[in-house]
């Protein structure tokens, strides 16, 4: 490994998931000499290589452009909430948009270390088939998902949360099934959900969980393999009675996601659980009788590892308080979504605890004091606090700025946030918008010969608005429907929803 291939660019983006692609496209469009490096052989991260094809979050900016371009090629379905993309076409669309923007990119390139001089990353050392290379850049954007660049550069990082003794969110593995009668599945599940909603809230059980309990009682499953999952129809399938679907189902618990040994354990565990779940679906889920496993996801469903410590730490309290910032650069309107680290009795924790109510969140005195499955290490007191679906928070630019490195931004699921906040703000659309914002900030810094710490947040906010991120505007579509719905706030699947007089809720699956 003695071949040196040196690059010298304005903006280096490390990691080709959705956040990194959005960042590289934006930086190149701003006239920056841009290089994107990715360790795999395709772009899109968990969306494409992990089969998480539903785009959660507020779809705007580069994310909206990407989805709309896919729609025109029958590679996506634009819906009011959770639009879905076809993973293979989505990979190619990123390549096209990168090339058209003028950004260069390299596949199969792994980051080894950072050269730090005078509180700046002077170079990123990487390896690929060429051998060793040193990439020098005026600004660096860490979109690795694991804060690999930030950690290598000596930026302080957080992992996990004290409530769960440093463990990470549970991980899951996406997979693709063929020969599914999706039409039949929707009909049967719809009938179940209609009956389920007629029951008192404490008696309602998720469809797949109820079916798994049947299988456990019959000896066909050893445990709950999936506490709740989404079924994404593969876009482009013309016959809903025999089509491909993607699922994000199996869960592995007690995870330490900065350990290669534990990540290996998780993948092996999930491979086995996927096979169990496919057998279960064939026998217990109408519509799946003839399904076959087409593909395991190539990328494990890791939801969080390291989070760099930045100029500002974005918090779950900010989300619940629907906080807005003068340097706000991304909209976050979704519930909290921290997948439980230890318990298969709930998919995600969608509330935090506070000693007093937080406005405009939906708050109630804690009912978790004796709930060992929700809080296994200590009872939580005070108030349960859930984001109000009628409002939204913003993510500030300063949360993307590394604490002690002058030319580094962090985006996607490794920006500066607490555990519960990143559990929500790691969703796809939000990741893409933080990538877009960091690239705009990096371009501003290069043009003004400033460091990242001094990036003009107000100027970057205006750049975001000019690039179809509707900051300072009321949210439209699905979000407006929730905001304007008549009814009282209630709890469904641990999240706050508006329950209408008809009994329906503002939440759309």
Image (cartoon, helix red, strand yellow):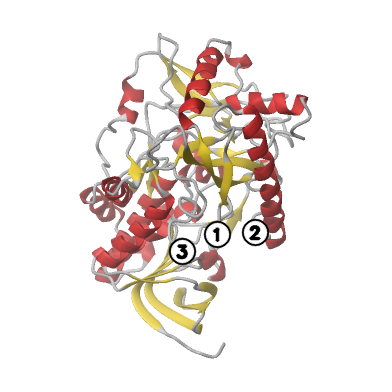
Element carrying mark 3: loop
Q: Which residue is mark 2?
A: 258
Q: Residue at x 58, y 11 (%)?
A: 200
Which of pointers 1 and 3 lies earlier in the amino acid sequence? 3
As drawn, the label of residue 146 is: 1
Q: Quadrant of the N terminus?
A: bottom right
The x, y position of residue 441, in whole percent, is: 32, 60
Neighbour tally class for label 3: few under 14, some 14-19, many 20 plus, Cα within 10 Å: many
Quadrant in the picture for residue 202: top right
Mark 1 and mark 2 in contact (Cβ < 8 Å)? yes
Q: CA distance from mark 2 to mark 1?
A: 8 Å
Q: CA distance from mark 3 to mark 2?
A: 17 Å
- The residue closer to the viewer here, 481 or 106, is 106
Judge left or right: residue 43 versus residue 160: left
Q: Which residue is mark 3?
A: 15
In this picture, is 249 found above or below 398?
above
In this picture, is 211 found above or below 317?
above
Note whether residue 252 is visible. Answer: no
């Amino acid at each position: 490994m003695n071949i040196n291939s040196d690059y010298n660019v304005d903006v280096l983006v490390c990691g080709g998931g959705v956040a990194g692609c959005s960042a590289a496209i934006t930086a190149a469009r701003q006239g920056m000499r841009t290089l994107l490096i990715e360790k795999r052989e395709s772009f899109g991260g968990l969306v494409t290589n992990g089969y998480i094809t539903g785009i959660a979050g507020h779809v705007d900016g580069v994310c909206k452009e990407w989805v709309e371009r896919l729609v025109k090629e029958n590679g996506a379905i634009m819906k009011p909430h959770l639009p879905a993309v076809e993973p293979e076409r989505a990979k190619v669309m990123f390549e096209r948009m990168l090339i058209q923007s003028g950004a260069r990119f390299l596949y199969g390139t792994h980051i080894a270390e950072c050269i730090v001089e005078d509180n700046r990353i002077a170079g990123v050392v990487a390896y690929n088939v060429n051998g060793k290379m040193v990439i020098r850049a005026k600004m660096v954007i860490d979109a690795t998902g694991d804060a690999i660049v930030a950690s290598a550069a000596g930026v302080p990082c957080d992992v996990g949360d004290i409530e769960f003794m440093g463990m990470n969110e549970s991980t899951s593995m996406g997979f693709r099934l063929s020969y599914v009668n999706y039409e039949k599945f929707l009909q049967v599940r719809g009938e179940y959900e209609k009956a389920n909603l007629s029951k008192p809230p404490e008696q309602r059980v998720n469809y797949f969980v109820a079916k798994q309990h049947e299988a456990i009682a019959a000896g066909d499953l050893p445990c709950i393999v999936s506490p709740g999952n989404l079924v994404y129809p593969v876009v482009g399938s013309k016959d809903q009675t025999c089509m491909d679907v993607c699922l994000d189902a199996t869960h592995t618990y007690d995870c330490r996601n900065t350990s290669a040994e534990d990540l290996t354990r998780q993948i092996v565990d999930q491979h086995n659980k996927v096979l169990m779940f496919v057998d279960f679906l064939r026998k217990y889920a109408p519509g799946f009788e003839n399904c076959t496993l087409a593909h395991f996801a190539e990328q494990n469903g890791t939801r969080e590892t390291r989070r760099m410590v930045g100029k500002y730490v974005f918090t779950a309290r900010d989300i619940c308080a629907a906080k807005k910032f003068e340097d706000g650069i991304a909209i976050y309107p979704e519930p909290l979504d921290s997948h439980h680290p230890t318990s298969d009795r709930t998919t995600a924790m969608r509330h935090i605890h506070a000693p007093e109510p937080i406005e405009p969140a939906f708050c109630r005195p804690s009912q978790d004091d004796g709930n060992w499955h929700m809080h296994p290490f200590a009872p939580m007191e005070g108030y349960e606090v859930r984001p109000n679906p009628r409002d939204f928070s913003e993510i500030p630019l300063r949360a993307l700025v590394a604490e002690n490195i002058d030319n580094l931004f962090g985006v996607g699921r490794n920006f500066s946030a607490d555990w519960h906040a990143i559990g929500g703000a790691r969703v796809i659309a939000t990741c893409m918008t933080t990538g877009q914002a960091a690239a705009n900030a990096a371009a501003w810094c290069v043009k003004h010969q400033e460091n990242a710490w001094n990036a003009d947040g107000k100027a970057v906010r205006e750049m975001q608005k000019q690039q179809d991120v509707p900051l300072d505007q009321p949210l439209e579509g699905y979000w407006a429907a929730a905001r304007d719905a008549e009814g009282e706030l209630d709890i469904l699947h641990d999240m706050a929803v508006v329950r209408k007089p008809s009994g329906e809720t503002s939440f759309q699956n």
